[in-house]
Amino acid sequence: MAEEDNKPQEINPTAKSPSETPVKKLPRRAAGAMPVVEIKDDLLVKTLQEKFGKNILSANEINSQQVLQVEKIALTKILLYLKDNATPSFSMLTDLTAVHFPDQAEQPFEMVYQLYSIADKRRLRIKTRLADGETIPTVTNIWATANWLEREVYDLFGIHFDEHPDLRRILLPNGWKGHPLRKEHYLEYKDNEWVEENLQIRELSSDSDFIGKFE
Amino acid sequence: MADITDITDITDIIEQENESNEMILSMGPQHPSTHGVLRVVLKLDGEIVTDLDCDIGYLHRGVEKICEHRNYQMIAPYFDRTDYIAAVSNGLCYVETIEKALNLEIPLRAQYLRVILVELNRLSSHLLWLATHALDIGAVTVFLWAFREREEILKIFENFFGARLTCHAFRIGGMTYDAYDGFQAQVKSFCDRFPKCLEDYETLLNTNRIWLSRTVGIGIISSDDAINIGLTGPPLRGSGVEWDIRKAHPYECYSDLEFDIPYGENGDTYDRYLVRMEEMRQSRRIILQALEKLPDGEVMAPKAPKTVKPPIGEYYHSIESPKGELGIYLVSDGSAQPARLRIRPPSFVNLQALRQMAIGHLVADVVAIIGTLDIVLGEIDR
């Protein structure tokens, strides 16, 4: 037993680059879909469709939650309208996030805005599609909430926001390579260079006699 | 003088200090009153804060990324560790989201038990907030007293789940275990004793001159600003917005229970203190009602699936956690693992208001304002 304990622990091969192929997912079986119903008799959605026409790509109720898919060009106009002029007025931006769909090669990123109207107790989700490397206008001038939320999306997805007042990484340290929530980012990716440079922790080579991973 | 956001290390700070009379002070990440590993870089003119910047991410574990590589049942324990002060509430938000996405009805008894446990968790979270907030401002007795009551709640949790902090309370489809023998009596006896404890805290604080001068008029935020910056939970209600998800979008059996939403007027630290104190009374009221109405029956839905595979689509669900609106946005691709699981942490959004609330106040007030926002870094950094 003791001899076995003294053996050097198995060391992972050196960290893979962030652009390595993603970890394989479990095989997918045919699954149902959540009920999707087109919104028809809704005053707000109707006004939006009249006002913005083709820029509203679709208006659906997914699992009884209202979702609007819009064009990126009209995004800020629509959001501004929803906050200032629409009835009910969506005074609160509950959440802002992104989703990565690598199989949709043309526009793999989807920005998701969860709006909320306190007066009417109503939620509305606005989504828009982005190509890789494309930038998107900031909404910090509409809701102050967006500041840190956009920084988080920039940090974890690498999506740039035009005219954001303070676009820096927020959760990961400056100088970190890669954007972890992209699907191509390897789950167990370690930036050994960064760790060595900033924390002075060096990984031992696989033939070293020491026990443990780090020096 | 360089912009505050340029500061990356301590040498920069010292160089900049020499250039002007303003001082840059780095507070944290190892600081007793930043409630975890939060670093706040303050720009000071004398003792007045003229600007500040929060440095977060010291506890970043990539929970959202890990979730994309775990089966749905395996994800639940991670939620105990995001907001570790309110593990039961966080667990509830996760299992509810999945149940809603699966369109799964859970038995009434499980709903009532969940509400009792979540409200007990709200009490323990608010007690911890009261204890540390009062300690930051210098009231040591309240700290000891509040921890005494919190201990009783943690004992109930220990009896129920076998854990005090990271409870892993609920399962998708209901609960693993029914209440233990004597659960109702233990909760009842705690609730009977609790109003006296609250009165005791209030005699120490409500008219205390030091407490009043440290909290009244500190960190004022108007209701419009609060909504614009996305505050939720007690900080929003302290600014006079009567909004609570338990009332606005009732989940579990909240629509059957009677309770009021306390809200403040001035939006200062003292009002937020009053709001949370009243919320504790309301939580006790909810618990007592739920105990009385607690029906018999199963605690696990008979149709709960063994392999959880929500249908393809997306779902957003949020609950009123002790800190504010805790939301989960689930994107499912029909497999046993989520395509994306976004956590909308209340503390993350609430902390953003610190800058607006602290500018113009003293350094000591920054500590009070961090306390009144009731943040948990495990949730902010995820």
Image (tube, coloured by chain):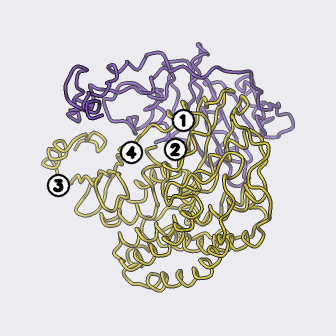
Q: Horizontal and vertical percent for residue A135?
A: 50, 23
Q: Earlier in the sequence, mark 1 or mark 2?
A: 1
Helix, strand or loop status at disc 3: loop
Q: Which chain: yellow? A: B
> Taking B171 as reference, is B211 above or below it?
below
> Could you tell me how far apart the alpha carbons at marks 2 and 4 are, in whole angstroms?
14 Å
Residue at horizontal 63 percent and vertical 33 percent from the top: A77
Residue hosting label 3: B21
Q: Earlier in the sequence, mark 2 or mark 4?
A: 4
Residue hosting label 4: B59
CB within 8 Å, label 2 to label 4 = no
> Taking B148 as reference, is B104 above or below it?
above
* Tags 3 and 2 both on a single chain: yes
Please tell me how crowded label 4 is: few (under 14), some (14-19), or many (20+) other residues with Cα within 10 Å.
some
Please tell me how crowded label 1 is: few (under 14), some (14-19), or many (20+) other residues with Cα within 10 Å.
many
Residue hosting label 1: B67
> Could you tell me how far apart the alpha carbons at marks 1 and 2 are, in whole angstroms?
8 Å
Which of label 4 and label 3 is nearer to you?
4
